[in-house]
Image (tube, helix red, strand yellow):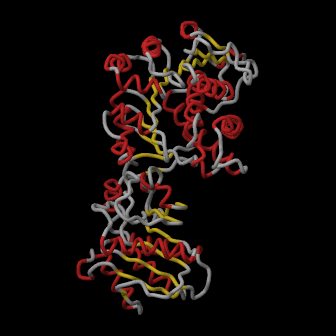
């Protein structure tokens, strides 16, 4: 299994503070500065190159002092701008500052004019940012971004880009746009979701010789194929289509039949033995000419078919007939995925919410941020301000395994467990990709996967398939939803072959 597919622990700022307290006797700042200096050296190999270091008023600044001292020892021409007061530095940072000065370093008040930089290091603010970055700090952030772009040099953020909320991925005022981020001790959720990926660049983790998971429970995890190994089993040679489940898709109202077709094609190619489409459009075709294996039905016939899982929502519409068919679908004793229009109907109907809560079989939700806002009765901005909180609240409120889609999709279970998916790219921001994801989810459910694992696998696979299409030159601009399906099939079969 490739290391890039393995799940990694993620820690909120509060949990990391606990880890740091438990390891307080260890020289964590020295280790952090050393790890930063080693990465900076690997990114900037030119002897005597000019390096700009920005050091802030807290322990992140202390990490920067250590890194700057070590880079000077390695013959880099270091200019360190200190944005703070020496007398107010925390003890460890103050000690790092003194050693930097004792070794011949100088504290500058402003960025030298006229220098061309080979490397810029951001050590202004780390995790636990309590206020928007503005004023002098904001000016330094904007200058660092401008100079890195001008000089086309790496911009390395220590622990977390200054201005980014490490817990949520929300921007707090002016924010460093790093080319590389070195995360100390463990990963942080905000680096991987919301605005995090656009501001972190390439992320590496320096453990500082700590095993964080032995000291404190992780707040969350990234999604990795290693979480799925118990379910990635080769098929028995003595199997038939009935062995692989029956997936149903309810949707396809007038002018939106294509959404149901995309979901059905995705479900078929991810291994469901039979795929039934229940189309609400009375004028819908009797066959999908590009995928004649799909069995097209009227909604009533769909709900009477031998289904092992059902997805409702792709192209479903919001009319009275859609509402009634959704209510009937909720009464079926099988795993049920609600997406798209089904989520909007759920948000507007208290009776439907009660029926969902009363279900004994698993329920899954796959909203994008605006749909999540309707389900939570808040604004889309509120959802995006704290995506992990919104996903966890949805899972708890509706008793459903939930994915909050978007950059760094969040998967949350009703019991509180949650994950951040790191696969995928902007090519997925196009019509129909959500329908394809629904098809993947319902296919795995139909084949007997547990709800949480089916959601994790489908979400991660969806992103992996898009990444592989981009690597092959088919995006991200102009990537279409249908192109993802065959890439996902190939990737999934590789997972099964490697996992056995």
Q: Is residue 413 above or below residue 425?
A: above
x, y percent for residue 436: 60, 32
Q: Is residue 212 above or below residue 454?
A: below
x, y percent for residue 497: 71, 37
Name the residue nearer the viewer: 127 or 134. Answer: 134
Quadrant in which residue 440 is drawn: top right
Q: Residue at 23% of width from left, 78% of height from top?
A: 88
Image quarter hosting the C terminus: top right
Q: Is residue 410 left or right of residue 46?
A: left
Q: Is residue 304 above or below residue 144?
A: above
Q: Is residue 235 left or right of residue 187?
A: right
Name the residue nearer the viewer: 91 or 479. Answer: 479
Farthest residue, direction bottom: 104
- Would residue 287 be visible to someone looking at this image? yes
- Would residue 331 be visible to someone looking at this image? no
x, y percent for residue 247: 60, 19
Q: Residue at 73% of width from left, 19% of height from top?
A: 292
Name the residue nearer the viewer: 324 or 442. Answer: 324
Instruction: Count numbered badges in the picture.
Output: 0
Farthest residue, direction left: 87
Q: Residue at 44% of width from left, 87% of height from top?
A: 112
Farthest residue, direction right: 237
Q: Residue at 45% of width from left, 86% of height from top?
A: 79
Quadrant in which residue 314 is drawn: top right
Q: Is residue 188 left or right of residue 296?
A: left
């Amino acid at each position: 299994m490739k290391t890039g597919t393995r799940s990694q622990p993620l820690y909120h700022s509060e949990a990391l503070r606990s880890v740091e307290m438990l390891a307080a006797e260890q020289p964590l700042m020295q280790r952090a500065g050393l790890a930063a200096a080693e990465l900076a050296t690997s990114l900037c190999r030119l002897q005597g190159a000019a390096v700009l270091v920005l050091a802030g008023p807290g322990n992140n600044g202390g990490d920067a002092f250590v890194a700057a001292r070590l880079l000077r020892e390695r013959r880099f021409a270091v200019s360190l701008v200190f944005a703070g007061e020496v007398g107010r530095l925390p003890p460890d940072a103050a000690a790092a500052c003194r050693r930097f000065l004792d070794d011949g370093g100088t504290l500058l008040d402003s960025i030298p004019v006229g220098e061309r930089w080979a490397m810029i290091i951001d050590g202004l603010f780390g995790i636990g940012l309590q206020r928007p970055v503005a004023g002098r700090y904001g000016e330094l952030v904007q200058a660092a971004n401008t100079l890195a772009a001008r000089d086309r040099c790496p911009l390395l953020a220590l622990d977390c880009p200054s201005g980014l909320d490490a817990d949520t991925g929300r921007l707090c005022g002016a924010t460093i746009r790093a080319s590389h981020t070195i995360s100390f001790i463990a990963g942080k959720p905000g680096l991987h979701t919301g605005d995090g990926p656009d501001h972190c660049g390439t992320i590496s983790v320096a453990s500082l010789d700590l095993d964080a998971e032995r000291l404190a429970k992780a707040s969350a995890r990234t999604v990795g194929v290693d979480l799925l190994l118990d379910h990635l089993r080769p098929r028995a040679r003595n199997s038939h289509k009935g062995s692989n489940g029956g997936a149903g898709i309810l949707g396809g109202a007038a002018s939106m039949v294509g959404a149901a077709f995309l979901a059905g094609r995705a479900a078929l190619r991810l291994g469901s033995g039979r795929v039934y489409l229940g189309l609400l459009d009375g004028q819908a075709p009797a066959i999908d000419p590009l995928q004649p294996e799909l069995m097209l039905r009227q909604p009533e016939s769909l709900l009477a078919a031998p289904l092992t899982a059902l997805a409702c929502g792709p192209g479903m519409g919001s009319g009275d007939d859609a509402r009634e068919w959704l209510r009937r679908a909720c009464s079926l004793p099988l795993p049920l995925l609600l997406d798209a229009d089904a989520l909007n109907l759920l948000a507007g109907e208290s009776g439907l919410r009660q029926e969902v809560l009363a279900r004994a079989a698993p329920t899954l939700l796959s909203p994008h941020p605006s749909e999540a806002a309707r389900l939570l009765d808040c604004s889309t901005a509120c959802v995006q301000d704290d995506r992990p909180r919104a996903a966890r609240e949805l899972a708890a409120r509706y008793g459903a395994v939930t994915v909050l889609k978007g950059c760094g999709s969040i998967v949350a279970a009703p019991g509180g467990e949650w994950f951040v998916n790191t696969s995928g790219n902007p090519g997925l921001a196009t019509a129909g990709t959500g329908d394809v994801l629904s098809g993947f989810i319902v296919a795995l459910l139909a084949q007997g996967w547990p709800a949480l694992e089916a959601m994790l696998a489908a979400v991660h696979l969806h992103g992996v398939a898009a990444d592989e299409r981009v690597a092959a030159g088919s995006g991200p601009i102009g990537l279409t939803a249908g192109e993802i399906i065959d890439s996902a099939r190939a990737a999934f079969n590789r997972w099964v072959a490697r996992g056995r």
